[in-house]
Every structure is written in structure tokens, then in C-alpha cells.
Image: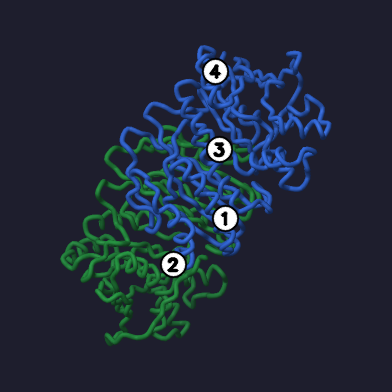
Chain colours: A green, B blue
Amino acid sequence: MAVEEFSLIERYFKSSQASRNTSGLDVGIGDDAAILSPPAGQRLCVAVDTLVSGIHFPENTPACDIGYKALAVNLSDLAAMGASPYAFTLALTLPDTKEHWLQGFSEGLLTLAKEHQIALIGGDTTRGPLTISVQVLGLLPCQQGLLRSGAKVGDDIYVSGNIGDASLGLQIQQGKLIPATEGKHQQYLLSRLNRPTPRIALGQALLDLANSAIDVSDGLLVDLKHVLDASQVGARIKLEAIPLSPAYQACTDSQNVPSLHRYTQALEAGDDYELCFSAAKEKREQLKALKGHIPITRIGEIIKEKTLQCLDANGVEFDYDPRGFEHF
Amino acid sequence: MAVEEFSLIERYFKSSQASRNTSGLDVGIGDDAAILSPPAGQRLCVAVDTLVSGIHFPENTPACDIGYKALAVNLSDLAAMGASPYAFTLALTLPDTKEHWLQGFSEGLLTLAKEHQIALIGGDTTRGPLTISVQVLGLLPCQQGLLRSGAKVGDDIYVSGNIGDASLGLQIQQGKLIPATEGKHQQYLLSRLNRPTPRIALGQALLDLANSAIDVSDGLLVDLKHVLDASQVGARIKLEAIPLSPAYQACTDSQNVPSLHRYTQALEAGDDYELCFSAAKEKREQLKALKGHIPITRIGEIIKEKTLQCLDANGVEFDYDPRGFEHF
């Protein structure tokens, strides 16, 4: 780590969290590696996700939103495992040293870190095209954890929050869409793109309730397919059960998107970072109780036949090959 | 993770280590996150280092060497803490999907992983300018660990291996230098650049012997300065004690580099990934015994005055402001 880089990290990332109380952080930023003493009896969850400028976010995205999202998408992976966030590192590749940008980026990043009570424990800053890799460490009680491979035939399929918002947010960020009802909807959809909510509390609540889970990053059906493959099962989805936000409905109304298409469009959209999970029918009551705090919607069921069936409003299956957002 | 990306990772990274026996790896590649059950009574060491094409390696570097080095520089950070390698993740940003390149890259990466008995537990593959971030997890016995902040006045200062080789290797890789005695030296210097040896065994041996340690990535003196700053001490270095390899000497001989300058050139060179450490004088005998297995050289001592003094062959201090390799 070179002198200039060192002082950059010191200035923007270390000082601002000096007061963070991370249990078991023996050595943080400033040595060759961090040293942690994780609590006994816990398993360690590790995920890494990279955002590349122009691929994962438009180049005009505010720095604070990039910082926020870089951590959010990783926390979303922990949420999908049912883990509680513990610590994270940052590998930041920057084309140049714009202090203003770094200030915003670190603010966004550390705002979310503070919310989840986790510390940045190390990092590497390099020069090059804007690329951000965050790696998160989470904790899981022994013997617990939500896997993609646990879906059982007969399980209900649920999704949290609303689907499709981020894709409209992206169109707004790119200047391709100006909602008829600007103000509120515009701000909501942009925040769904740039500041997704990692469903950490939901993930942990699901440890005792769900049989499988995944986060929706590439598109609901594409991600669900990973669960089906890993669990060696199929699924039947009721298209019009897919939860759409008022903002999404208003925008697609004003664009005259046909009814069915607005659902398939939502299903193919990425970047929502909601959780899609399956749970036994016996858990319905408990999940209803949960619904008081966290929005979840039942959208279908796990079936034995290894196919993904989409039913329209009349319960009729229609031929549909979902495409997801291909990051690569 | 998109479908194509998923199959890429499956093909090149997962299958090739199916037989790896990583204790405590409950869930590896293929879910939202990996799950580990680290052995009880150990602390966790975490480091991350990024390599950017054209910055950290010339663009004509063979893919297998890039893969090897991306892990090696991270293991070097663990070595500097005295940690034993445990697991790692890979964030790989690629401009395009060249199977030939991926084949070479994964071979180099997994060769070194195998050598140190660690598994790739997760990753993210994205499209963009070639950038590789590896994050390593290591284990440290409780209460143990080498820090930058532990140097004591009166400590001897040591460095492992030889210094300056990688800088000549870089000149060769860039086509700027053709050693007079090609063959052997050329190959040696290139391998010192592209396949640095993380000093894992040395780091662990030093847990009971050294007071401080750092790995030499940016230049011996620049890195030593981090130790001095963290420990609030100074150092006196005997310039001509700096260990230079026969290849380095032969090359600088043929270039007619003046004697003193060949040492300062070595001190300012980065990328050697040797360990620089300090140890009490009472440990000299034990360190001599160690020297039978691992090359280490005593190059100076820790002093109270917070300066970095360089002495020439006559023991006379000369005015010298070392510059290191600035990655950023």
C-alpha cells in the first residue's frame, strides 16, 4: 500500500468509524491484514460482489449511492443465507483521486454499514477503471442457514417487497423515462435502484421458517431457477400474484404496457435485491404474522416436475422463457 | 449471478478443486454465500489485494502468472501476520470471455491454492476492464500475530530472500531489459516478478521470534516506514547488507549501475513480497537456526530517534529519501 493510498483510506474510511464498536475486531485497517475473533459457536458466511461502472450502475450515478449499493448488494447475499452481518472489506479501483467523489462514496458506504453495525476492516485502493468489490463476512448459528438446495415439493414460494422497481429506476437514471407523476414516484423508483434494502431481518426470521432462499439480483425467475436446479424441483408461478408497487403500476400504466407484459417485464428485471424463498404450507400462519412487519407475497408453489410454469390470471399456463439481467 | 457467469465459474474454478479437503467448509461455491466453520480457538485474519491490468502487471503477462500472482500477493499479507492460509474468494472482472485465458488464469491460481491447501469458496465474475481482487482468510492462534506496531528499540531488522529482483523482472516483461546472460537469469527474474513466493512458513515461524513484520510490496524502505510509524520508532539500515541475488548483481553489473545506486534501486523496487521484520537481539541464535531453511538477512536495527538512516559501506549516513512504488 503506497503512501498516498494509505492516507486516502485513513482519511475517508478509518476515521469515520473509529467509534464503531465491533465485537471481536482485534486489528482493523492499517496492518497487512485484519484480525477478528468471531464469537464462539457461530459459523462464518462469506460473500463477494463487484460493481463495475457502466455495467452495474450508470456512470451518472451519485457517488454516495454507489457506495451504498456496493455494500447493499453484498448484505443482500448474507440476507439470503439468513446470516447477520459481521464485517466487510473494500477493494476500490478508481480512475483518479477526486476527494469530492471519495467523500460521497464513503458516506454512502458507511451510512449502511452503521445501520447494520458492521465495520470496514480492511481494503485496497488501486488506480484503474471504476470497479468496487466488497466482501462481507456474516455470522450464522451452527446448524442453521438458508440454502438454495432446500426447496421441497409442495412448498409455497414467496417474494419480499416489490419486483421491477429497480428496472424503472434504471430507466430514469439513464434519462430514458420521465414518469408522468414525477416527484414521488421518480424518487421512490430511483431509490429502489440506488439504495436497495438488504432484507437482513427477514433472512434471519426465515431461518426457522423457510426451506430455501435466494436474493433476487438477476431477475426473479432466473434466480428462482437457481433454487429449482439446486433443489432438483420445479415451480408454478401465478403471474398476477407478483407484487408490483404503485409507482411501477403508475409508470407502466402511463406507458400503456399491456397487463401481462408488465408482469413479465418485472420478472425479467434485475437489481431488486428482494428475497425469494420457499416454505412448507404449515408455516403459512407464522409467515402471515411476519407479514405485519415485512412485506412478503405468496406467488406460487414448488412442484415435482422439473419445469418452471407461469400461469396467467385465468390459471392457464403460457409459454414463456424468462430472461434475466446478464451481468456478464 | 447470471447463467453464463455461473457456468464459467463452475467450469473453471469449482470442478478443479472438487477433491480439495477444506476442513470446515460447509457450503462452497454455488450459493449466495459460502459457509465456514473455522476451527475453535483460532482468530481470523482477513486481507484483500487487487491487481489491475497495466498497473500491477504488464498487459502481456501470461494468464497463468496473473492467476498465480493474484493469490500470492494476498497470501503474502497473511504471511506478514504469521497466519496460516484458510480459504479465499475471487472477484474477477474480465473484458471478454476468452476460454483460453480463463483456463490459464485458473490453472495458475489453483496451483498456488493447492500448494497451500486452501479452497476457493466463492466469487463474482463481471464484465469490464481486467481487474482481479482476491480476498484471503487466514487462521491465527489466539493471542498470537505479527503486527506493524510491535517493533522495539534495539531490535534487529531482517529481510527475507532478495530484494530488487521483481523490478528487473518487470523491465524484462516490458521488453526494456534483455539480460546479458539471458537464459537462467532472465527466467529467474521473471519468475520473481510473476510468481512471488509468499513467505507463509517464515511468518508462522516468526510468531515466537519477531516483534513486528510487514511484507515488502511497495519497496523495502517505504514498507519499513509503515512499521516505524506504527511502532513510533526509527531505524538504521546498512545499505550494503541488503541481500541482492546473483541475477540482480549480474544485470546491474552489465548495465554499469554504480555500486551504491544498485542498492538504492533495490530499496525502491516494489513487488518482491519478502518479509521485513524486527526481532530482539536475544533471538539471533534462533533466527540463525531458521536461516538454514529460509534465507533471511540482518540489515539494520531499530533506534529510538524517529528517523530512517541509511549507512554506506563506511558506516557513514548519507542523505536519501526513498521512494516506493506508488500503486496509486
- Placement of A119 over or under B104, stated as above or below: above
**Cα distance in 3D space between marks 4 and 1:** 39 Å
According to the picture, the residue beneath numbered tag 2 turns out to be A218
Label 3 is placed on what type of residue? Glu
Q: Which quadrant holds residue A244?
A: bottom left
**Cα distance in 3D space between marks 1 and 2:** 28 Å
According to the picture, the residue beneath numbered tag 1 turns out to be B104
**Cα distance in 3D space between marks 4 and 3:** 38 Å
According to the picture, the residue beneath numbered tag 4 turns out to be B288
Q: Position of residue B58 (x, y in %)?
A: 68, 50
Q: Residue at x 72, y 33 (%)?
A: B248
Q: Position of residue A39 (x, y in %)?
A: 31, 38
Label 1 is placed on what type of residue? Gly
Q: Residue at x 27, y 69 (%)?
A: A157
- Chain under numbered label 1: B
- Chain under numbered label 3: A
Q: Residues within 10 Å of mark 1 (few under 14, many from 20)?
A: some
Do callouts 4 and 1 point to residues on the same chain?
A: yes
Disc 3 element: helix
Q: Any mark on residue A10, and which?
A: 3
